[in-house]
Image (cartoon, grey):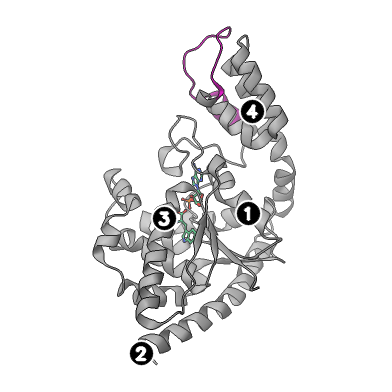
Amino acid sequence: MKPKRMLSGIQPTGDVHLGNYFGMMKPAIEMQDSVETYLFIADLHALTSSIEPDALRKNTISVALDFISCGLNPEKTIFFKQSDVPEVTELTWILSCQTSMGLLERCHSYKDKTARGMISNHGLFAYPVLMAADILIYKSDIVPVGRDQKQHLEVTRDIAIRFNNRYGEILTIPEAVIRNESAALPGTDGQKMSKSYGNTIELFGDEKTLRKKIMGIVTDSKGLEDAKNPDDCIPYQIYKLLSGKKNADEMAEKLRAGGYGYGHAKKELFDAYWEHFRPFREKRSAILNDSSYIEKVLADGAVKAGGTARKTVCEIRKAVGLK
Ligand code: AMP
Ligand code: TRP
């Protein structure tokens, strides 16, 4: 049987946080041993957010550093920068001409972003077509993402099915891989953790700042002695992902029993979090100043990814009559 190919991407729009880690990075890194893996930094997508050039450059390197520190193995995974494979923009155009306006008008992400005041440029509207091109150009079978990307995967499938109906079975129809327990991790204010809500807990940074963020997670007003429902307790929901089942069951029991306050839960969460990321922090500080290493990994990745992309685009050019 043909080995499965997995692909995912992340925008370099800020520091990587626990939502990114549990929603996408961890599942992807865990799969790199069993499937052919493509991971990339979606710098073209980041341009839709009117990011400053220096911030884009800096974030691209720091997101790459974070991924490698968390266990992405460049020997196993093809790791690259989206813009280093310019064929993806050509495919975006070809797919755009097969994509109805209605399909894009229905996308929540566009509606949410403009409702929050983001400037509604054409790139923001066409964002899902570039994402479809990212996925389809590498003939990806599976795409690990958080729940906020589910609709974009549905759009990708729609575009691919329509394309294949018209031009023949060229594109692979991808499947989203969304882990229920971490599909939409809450942030410090109880909304979905997101760079645009200012409610994130980053993977790396200053201990004092991160401790303060965790101690500031919102909870209800139950007192120390009250019995508490673990499912209503955000620190518990995050702790569950970090600590293993046995420790999580113990915290749930203590919350239900009463006499155990939210402050205690937050303290246990901070300790588990700080321990979990310790080895990654150590790796990160060892390679932190070696930006030439990161650049080399991304350049090597781009060569490999470019080879695959060119093959697909060549097939597509023939199919649509450009060749
Ligand atoms: P982004 O930072 O928007 O490029 O997101 C990168 C990946 O992290 C995507 O697969 C998102 O779905 C995922 N992600 C972002 N925030 C969360 C969250 N709060 N919970 C789960 N997954 C998330
Ligand atoms: N839109 C994704 C996000 O913001 C990033 C992304 C771009 C992506 N292209 C992709 C994710 C292709 C998976 C596959 O999270």
Q: Quick one: SS at disc 1?
A: helix
Name the quarter where the N terminus is drawn.
bottom right
Q: Position of residue 48 (x, y in %)?
A: 36, 58
Name the quarter where the C terminus is drawn.
bottom left
Q: Is residue 288 visible?
A: no
Chain-order first, disc 1 or disc 4: 1
Residue at 61% from the left image edge and 76% from the top image edge: 304
Query: Which sits in the foreground, 33 or 46?
Result: 33
The answer to whether 146 is drawn above or below residue 190 in the figure is below
Chain-order first, disc 2 or disc 4: 4
- What's the magenta region? 210-230
Disc 3 marks which amino acid?
Glu
CA gap, disc 1 and disc 3: 22 Å
Tell me the residue that label 3 is attached to: 52
Q: Position of residue 130 (x, y in %)?
A: 40, 66
Disc 2 marks which amino acid?
Gly
